[in-house]
Image: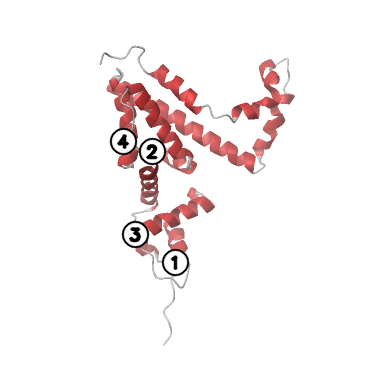
């Protein structure tokens, strides 16, 4: 009696339906091919199961990405934060930065409309910490939202620029010319850039996020906090 056809993809394995294994396979695809290449069909092939089986665990590709992001947040974000409002904001923003820096693609996903609001408790706790810290420091609620959004743009922008610049440099692509770019500028037109010259790549590669964050937060918050 002939054996039924095996599912497309990996063969010789029983169907995999564990959420843990599904998310691990999705992370493998992202690490190998990039998050843009992740799809339900590709994930099913990676696991050696039918796409229908996956729909018992995920509604669609967007839901799969949200599950990945929430799992990562649960593993990397912790709720122990300072009680002082300014320090709480800085600690929460730093935690978000460090979590996303380990997964730069996640920062790119979260720039899409609607994704931030679908995150789970661990991630939203950090948003709450920044907003509540701003309010406790004297901001009105609408000002506190502005504080969070400004910090969010600064944080995500820093991660994405650094990730893309690092990828280009490692690959020998268009970033390779930066080592000499400012050394060749017209000194009469761009004297300061000419003075910096080939020091630019080394200076630009320094991690100044912590110092910049503190200065940024101090500029966003009221100068005089309310009395405790």
Give the spatial CA distance, label 1 vs label 3.
Answer: 14 Å
Q: Which residue is mark 4?
A: 125
Please tell me whether mark 4 or mark 2 is closer to you in this view: 4
Residue 111 horizontal/vertical position (percent): 43, 37
The local secondary structure at tag 1 comes to loop
Q: Which residue is mark 3?
A: 55
Residue 39 visible within the image: no
Q: Quadrant of the N terminus?
A: bottom left
Q: Which residue is mark 1?
A: 48
Give the spatial CA distance, label 1 vs label 2.
Answer: 32 Å
Q: Tell whether 162 sits left or right of 181.
A: left
Residue appearing at x 31%, y 19% in the figure: 137
Relative to residue 75, is residue 92 depicted above or below?
above
Q: Residues within 10 Å of mark 1 (few under 14, many from 20)?
A: many
Q: Which residue is mark 2?
A: 113
Relative to residue 80, is residue 118 depicted above or below?
below
Residue appearing at x 41%, y 21% in the figure: 217
Please tell me whether mark 1 or mark 2 is closer to you in this view: 1
Residue 184 horizontal/vertical position (percent): 74, 25
Asked if the residue at tag 3 contacts the one at tag 1, i.e. Cβ–Cβ closer than 8 Å, the answer is no
Q: Tell whether 153 sits left or right of 168.
A: left
User: Residue 219: which quarter of the image?
Assistant: top left
Residue appearing at x 64%, y 39% in the figure: 169
Q: Earlier in the sequence, mark 4 or mark 1?
A: 1
Asked if the residue at tag 1 contacts the one at tag 4, i.e. Cβ–Cβ closer than 8 Å, the answer is no
Residue appearing at x 48%, y 38% in the figure: 101
Q: Earlier in the sequence, mark 1 or mark 3?
A: 1
Please tell me whether mark 2 or mark 3 is closer to you in this view: 3
Please tell me whether mark 3 or mark 4 is closer to you in this view: 4
Residue 207 horizontal/vertical position (percent): 54, 30
Give the spatial CA distance, label 2 vs label 3.
Answer: 24 Å
């Amino acid at each position: 009696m002939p054996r039924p056809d095996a599912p497309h993809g990996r063969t010789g394995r029983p169907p995999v339906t564990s959420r843990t294994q599904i998310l691990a396979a999705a992370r493998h695809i992202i690490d190998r091919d990039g998050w843009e290449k992740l799809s339900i069909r590709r994930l099913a092939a990676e696991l050696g199961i039918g796409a229908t089986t996956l729909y018992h665990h995920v509604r669609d590709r967007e839901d799969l990405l949200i599950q990945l992001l929430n799992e990562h947040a649960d593993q990397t974000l912790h709720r122990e934060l300072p009680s002082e409002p300014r320090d709480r904001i800085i600690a929460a923003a730093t935690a978000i930065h460090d979590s996303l820096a380990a997964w730069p693609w996640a920062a790119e996903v979260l720039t899409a409309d609607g994704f931030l609001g679908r995150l789970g408790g661990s991630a939203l706790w950090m948003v709450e910490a920044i907003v509540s810290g701003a309010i406790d420091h004297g901001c009105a609620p609408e000002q506190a939202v502005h504080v969070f959004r400004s910090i969010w743009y600064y944080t995500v922008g820093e991660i994405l620029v650094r990730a893309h610049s690092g990828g280009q440099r490692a690959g020998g692509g268009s970033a390779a010319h930066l080592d000499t770019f400012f050394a060749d500028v017209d000194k009469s037109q761009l004297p300061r850039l000419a003075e910096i010259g080939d020091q630019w790549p080394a200076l630009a590669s320094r991690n100044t996020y912590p110092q910049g964050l503190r200065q940024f937060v101090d500029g966003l918050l009221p100068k005089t906090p309310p009395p405790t």
